[in-house]
Amino acid sequence: MGRENFHRILNETQQDVLRMGSLVEEAINRAVDALQRSDVALAEDILGADDIIDDLNVRIETNCLNLLALQQPMASDLRTIAAMLDIVIDLERIGDHACDIAQITKSLAEEPPLKPLIDIPKMAAKAREMLRESLNAFAHHDAAIAHRVPEKDDEVDRLYRAVFKELIEFMANDPRAINRGSNLILVALYLERIADHSTNICERVVYMVEGVPKKLKRSVVEINKAVAHSDALLQFGRTET
Amino acid sequence: MDYVVLTAGALLAAVGLLALAARRSAVRDDARPPDGTLHDSVPDAAARFDTLLEVIPAGVVIVEPPGRITAINSSAAKMFGIAPERAVGRALIECIRSYELDRRVAAALAQGVEESAELTFIAATERRLHVTTRAIDRGDGRREALVVAIDRTRMMELESMRRDFVSNVSHELRSPLTAIKIMTETLQGGVDKAASKEFLDNISRETERMIALVEDLLDLARLESGKLDLKFESVDLGDLIRDVVSSQASRAAKLDVRLDALVHDGGVTIAGDRDKLVQVVVNLLDNALRNTPAGGSVTAAVGRSDGKAYLEVADTGTGIPSEALPHVFERFYVVDRSRAKSKGGTGLGLAIVKHIVEAHGGTVEAQSELGRGSVFRCTF
């Protein structure tokens, strides 16, 4: 394999990462759309499309390993390949979370909606925006974008706490809402994780461009506080009933 | 039907472009003129084509193997949210993050496959695009792919609004019709005198509801088409609210809701169509009375604020959730459908208010606190 061929395959593999990112981004969008509309057919479609994401994942990993084994790349080429091997893991997980949301849509399809979804679509839009920008940072080898993206995680976490609190209140007031409420909390958790995976991608891009591994700022969801709050609410619900 | 015509026009333009693009490829790059006569016309054709590309509303992208953008017009750059100067020379998937579009372009480049499809493209906003991909054979064994994208986002929104409207009207008309049919059939079967009176009263009430809906629909159609002929005169808003409040007094008393008219600043007179302004107050009071429980109060008031005349209706009713507030002036928007059903109302009253107030050059806004009440204020 000559150097020209090496760069051709390296470029094609980078484009495959963007293709995989595009599919994953679309999967998140469609998963939340299906959840909002209780659209089981769309949910099935998302689950079926996951195979294409997995195939791309395998192709990218194979190309990266071949490039490493046969070309012994150095410096920025080596970091790009290492970054891609990490990024595809995050993208594959994000794709899995979209499938998890599609599964929840299927399982909740027979039940009436608990409430109109407002904050969950907002969370999805924000998480998707973070993913899109992290992939922009990768596509343009732009560390400045990568440094900015994690700041948006605060908003996703704020929405997560709001969704969590509201759903716990629903469940405390009406035990019949527990199945739907707990599943929607899982959806919010998956979206929160998608935002965290996007931050991971940004860290890989910073390493790829600057050559220095760096942990980017990420906010922590104060689950303990939220759980304490929910315990108090559940206690309140019990005394009420 | 405008959107159908627009879509057809846009598609025809796209087909024309496809043909022109094929010619452009040949003219610009391959058909080198054998003599001077043709030589003059060739740059002309390319310049004409470039100008055409820049002025048409369809997005056009030209891609060469293995997937690199060689040309992109302003419409496409805007549609896909990219800077043209950053796109040319780069891989398509790097600039336009759509797996489906990338796959179609790859098929056009590799096998000459031509495809048309509706694609959803998500950037800062979500867009619905009608995308045609086609291979252009350059004659030297090389191939380019042409992408023509037509933004159908607004058309899809209009189509969705039309469907919702037809569905809502059908539903609102069918409910009273079904009730009337059942009660008429029961009467035909024979019932005692007391039941007969109750059924006839119900039929009369359902008929009134249908008439109100049809009249509201006709009003709304006239308002939206701009065919409403406003007869401007000097209107004393204080007198106007006193008259309307007086006409609604017995209904308020039946509901055990206190109804008042307050005139501040010594009264306010504006230039307007009195009958239409009466309709504004009637609709606002009707909405307030339907949403205020027994023991509550509804107040219509007029006055001046910041040099402008205002007319407002405040209630101590159930209130409107903050997420519903931006939608209350939409046709058939109902905050709580289960409660609205028992309270009547066509779902068009506030939409009519908004149109009439805007036809007077005014604005209307709603403020509300859940559980404490709402205020609808028109400013002229």
Image (cartoon, rainbow, N blue to C red):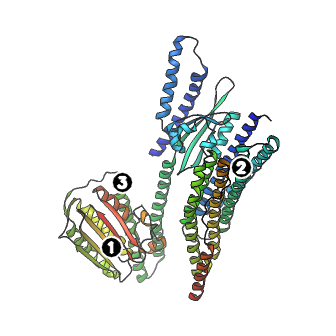
Q: Quadrant of residue A194?
A: bottom right
Q: Earlier in the sequence, mark 3 or mark 1?
A: 3
Q: Secondary structure at mark 1?
A: strand
The chain containing the residue under callout 3 comes to B
Check disc 1 and report the residue beneath it. Answer: B314
Where's residue B201, x and y in %? 39, 76
Identify the residue at image location x=51%, y=48%.
Answer: B153
Q: Secondary structure at mark 3?
A: helix
Check disc 2 and report the residue beneath it. Answer: A84
Instruction: Confirm whether circles 2 and 3 share one chain.
Output: no
Residue A71, above or below B294: above
Label 1: few (<14), some (14–19) or many (≥20) C-alpha neighbours in 10 Å: many
Instruction: Confirm whether circles 1 and 2 share one chain.
Output: no
- Determine the CA span between mark 2 and mark 3: 55 Å
Label 1 is placed on what type of residue? Ala
Q: Residue furthest right?
A: A69
- Res. B283 in view: no
